[in-house]
Structure formats: C-alpha cells, structure tokens
Image (spheres, coloured by chain):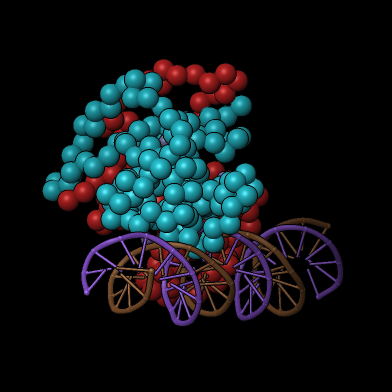
Chain colours: A cyan, B red, C purple, D brown
Amino acid sequence: MKYIEKLRNSGLRPTKQRLKICEVLFNTEKTFHFTINDLAKIIKDKLNNKISLATVYNTVHAFEKKGYLKQIPLNSNQTYFDTNTSDHHHFYDLTEEKLIDLKDSDVGPINIKKKINGKKIKSIEVLVKLDN
Amino acid sequence: MKYIEKLRNSGLRPTKQRLKICEVLFNTEKTFHFTINDLAKIIKDKLNNKISLATVYNTVHAFEKKGYLKQIPLNSNQTYFDTNTSDHHHFYDLTEEKLIDLKDSDVGPINIKKKINGKKIKSIEVLVKLDN
DNA sequence: CACCTTTTTAGAATCATTATAAAGTACATT
DNA sequence: AATGTACTTTATAATGATTCTAAAAAGGTG
Ligand SMILES: [Mn+2]
Ligand SMILES: [Mn+2]
Ligand SMILES: [Zn+2]
Ligand SMILES: [Zn+2]
C-alpha cells in the first residue's frame, strides 16, 4: 500500500481503518470535499466496511492536524473538509450544496490594500455562491 | 422609537424584546458581527435585561429572513451573523476571533472567469485570515 | 373590553461533535 | 516468537448549539 509510508512518516500507525480512509480520500487526483457524515456513509454503503464513527472523527482530525485535510468555512450545521489543503477558491452551488474548486487563474490575483498593524495575512480565499 | 416603524413595515410586531435587540444591533453606524451567545450576553450583562434565549434565536432568525442580518461562513461551532447584509469582504483575526469588514476598494474588483452551465453567480466574498 | 393572532418563554428534543475508558493493535525489544 | 508499552479503536456517554413544543403573555383591531 502506498499510504503505509505516508502514515508512518507522519508518526501515525498505518491501521486498517486509516488505510481505508486514505483510499477513500486520496485515491483520486481530484479534490474531495466532504463532511464526516459523507465519509462515514461512503465507508458503510459503498465499501461495506464498518469503522466506528468515533474513529472517523479521530482520523479526520489526525489528518487535518498533519496537514492532509483542511476545513472549509461554509454555513452548514456540519463541518466541511477538503483534500486540497492549499489556499484556493471555491464555487459553492447552493442548490446542490456542492463545493467546486477554482483555479487561481479562474479568479486572478487578489491584492489586499488594507493593512492591520501587527497582523500578517495568513490566507486569502474567495467563496463564490452559485444559484440556478 | 425609530425601530417601531421598521418592524411594523416588515410585518413584525414591535415587542419590547425585538426593540431591545434592534438597539443592540442597529444603533451604531458600524457593522456588528456576533454570535447568538455574544448577543445574549450583551443583553444580560451590559443591558441588565432578561430575554429568553429562545426569543433571541427567534428574533435573529426573523431579522435574517427579513434581510436585516446575514450569516457569515466561518469555521466555528457557533453561527456568526452580520448587520452588514451587503456582499462584502472580511478580515478574520484568528487570534482575537474577530471579523473586520473590508471595503470593496480594500480588495479591488474580482473577475470570475469560469462559468458553470445553467448557474448564476449570486455573491462573491473574500475571507482574509490574519495572524500575529 | 373582547377577540384573534403573534410572540415569548421554559423546558424538552435534536443532532453534530467531543470525551471516556476499556479492549484491541502496532511494533520495538528481548 | 513472546513480552511490554504506547497508540488506536470502539461503544457509549457527555456536551453544547440549535430547534421544537405548547402554554402563557402581549399586540392589534374593532
Ligand atoms: Mn453533505
Ligand atoms: Mn464570539
Ligand atoms: Zn477545495
Ligand atoms: Zn461584515
């Protein structure tokens, strides 16, 4: 498995559960946006695999802490995660409740002119909401 | 009271509770960013007034539906509201956990080049995270 | 006032998330 | 390979923000 190395290098033991979750999250070249519920449902329904919900939470948070996942700010009662951990922009389709990555070139450079004393810019992200 | 009219015109009865909340939220020219908890605490501690938490929730949601408040997407366990209901950009100070409005001129025009078939752009908002 | 509708309220219910602690597993060492 | 230890999984309970409920209170109209 290609994820065993990755986990070991992060100081995470490559357990069956973590490897399964890696496959779901990272075995695709395209960005994956999900909630814990989405992920748990995929594991249960599509993979017919049983991983306890606590482990799904634990694993997602461990991966987030290691920098393999990031949270996306959205108005939802559930937290959204993203396998694309770089600073990047999104379309949010309000009808489908789906996130879509934008390339920097889809948005163009953003130049923040205002400065706050003693504060540094850590990230700049655009959220474009879509309607029908 | 200047808010009695505003509420009546929106089809909302101007109750003591709603008028008090209007004063907290709208009696200032500058934008107010808050959570339900922030608002309830101000009413209780600073105004020595007792409004039930259910009423604070009801009122904030009523005002949101009438277009006097909007939600701000942030990664928090609590929902953030904003008295500035126009499309606008924010600094988010990660240390202070405070939102700051940006003027359009602080950011400059944003031109989204990508289009999705059958979808219209409803809003474009930038979130700039700040560090120390 | 009498009437009807809307609103407030305390408390219960819901639901995502986090905490707990016991059983299981990875893995370094012998 | 067996042992020891730290890490991980798991079922379950706890937490906490938000929503629901239904009864009492208040607004508005004639
Ligand atoms: Mn979802
Ligand atoms: Mn707050
Ligand atoms: Zn993304
Ligand atoms: Zn704002």
Residue in the image at 28% along x and 27% along y: A110
Q: Position of residue B66 (x, y in %)?
A: 58, 46
Q: Is residue C6 left or right of residue B57?
A: right
In the picture as drawn, the residue positioned furthest to the left comes out as: A118
Q: Position of residue A92 (x, y in %)?
A: 50, 34
Residue B35 seen by the camera = no
Quarter of the image where the N terminus of chain A is located: top left
Residue in the image at 56% along x and 52% along y: A40
Comparing C13 with A14, the one in front is A14
Instruction: Using the image, determine if residue B84 lies above or below residue A56.
Output: above
Residue A31 seen by the camera = yes
Q: Quadrant of residue A15?
A: bottom left
Residue in the image at 61% along x and 27% along y: A132
Q: Position of residue A24 (x, y in %)?
A: 50, 42
Instruction: Using the image, determine if residue A103 lies above or below residue B60.
Output: above
Residue in the image at 43% along x and 39% along y: A26
User: Image quadrant of ligand 2?
Assistant: bottom left
Q: Is residue C25 left or right of residue B131?
A: right
Q: Position of residue C10 (x, y in %)?
A: 61, 80
Comparing A25 with A118, the one in front is A25
